[in-house]
């Protein structure tokens, strides 16, 4: 996977820290050969948290016309996801995007955990689309999950993403810091 990483924070030192850490996390993955956008924001996108939930740290999302159906992306993110190709048409240069909120990017251990987790979702999406699609359907049936006595972390793609992210996090920061996160 060819990864284009955008680190939005303007402070050079913090920008460098975030970029270096993101490159280290990305290096743990053998990624499919498709273009991926990683967007590390310098602020919290309230549009996204309002839609998904206040606890949301970040997300992976395939980038196409549907990317804008349910979520209102800040204009500076939207212009990276799609490029105007005609009067009423857009090109989507990436297969998907990993987005991380600014307050998470400010915390290096949290950034590593979130980025690793969402990168694993991007691999799931590219390599096992049928499984990913059915899990996504299940996650959108929130009432069904509750009625079955399940929670978000029981969903198979979530279980796997959390395990992968935890292993990478332990490798970078050590077991104690991973347990804190
Ligand atoms: Zn997840």
Image (cartoon, helix red, strand yellow):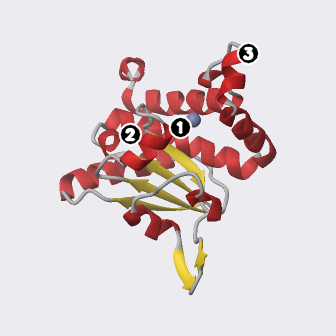
Relative vertical location of residue 170 with respect to residue 122 in this rendering, above or below: above
The residue located at (28%, 49%) in the rendering is 17
Report x, y in % for residue 179. Answer: 41, 17
Report x, y in % for residue 108. Answer: 32, 38
Q: Callout 3: few (<14), some (14-19), or many (20+) C-alpha neighbours within 10 Å?
A: few
Beta carbon of the mark 1 residue lies under 8 A of ligand 1: yes
Q: Which residue is mark 1?
A: 117
Between 41 and 35, the residue placed more toward the observer is: 41
Relative vertical location of residue 25 with respect to residue 36 in this rendering, above or below: above
Marks 1 and 3, how far apart at CA = 25 Å
Q: Which residue is mark 3?
A: 148
The residue located at (29%, 52%) in the rendering is 42
Marks 2 and 3, how far apart at CA = 32 Å
Could you tell me which quadrant the N terminus lies in?
bottom right
Label disc, if present, on residue 111 of the rendered structure:
2
The residue located at (61%, 25%) in the rendering is 152
Q: Secondary structure at mark 2?
A: helix
């Amino acid at each position: 996977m060819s990864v284009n990483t955008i680190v939005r924070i303007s402070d050079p030192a913090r920008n460098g820290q975030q970029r270096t850490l993101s490159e280290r996390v990305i290096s743990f993955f053998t990624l499919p050969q498709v273009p991926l956008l990683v967007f590390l924001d310098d602020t919290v996108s309230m549009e996204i948290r309002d839609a998904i939930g206040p606890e949301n740290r970040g997300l992976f999302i395939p980038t196409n016309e549907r990317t804008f159906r349910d979520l209102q992306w800040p204009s500076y993110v939207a212009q990276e996801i799609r490029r105007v190709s005609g009067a009423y048409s857009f090109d989507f240069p990436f297969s998907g995007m990993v987005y991380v909120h600014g307050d998470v990017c400010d915390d290096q251990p949290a950034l590593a955990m979130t980025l690793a987790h969402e990168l694993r979702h991007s691999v799931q999406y590219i390599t096992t689309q049928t499984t990913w699609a059915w899990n996504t359907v299940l996650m959108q049936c929130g009432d069904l999950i509750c009625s079955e006595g399940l929670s978000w972390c029981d969903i198979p793609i979530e279980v796997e993403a959390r395990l992968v992210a935890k292993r990478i996090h332990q490798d970078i920061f050590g077991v104690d810091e991973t347990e804190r996160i």
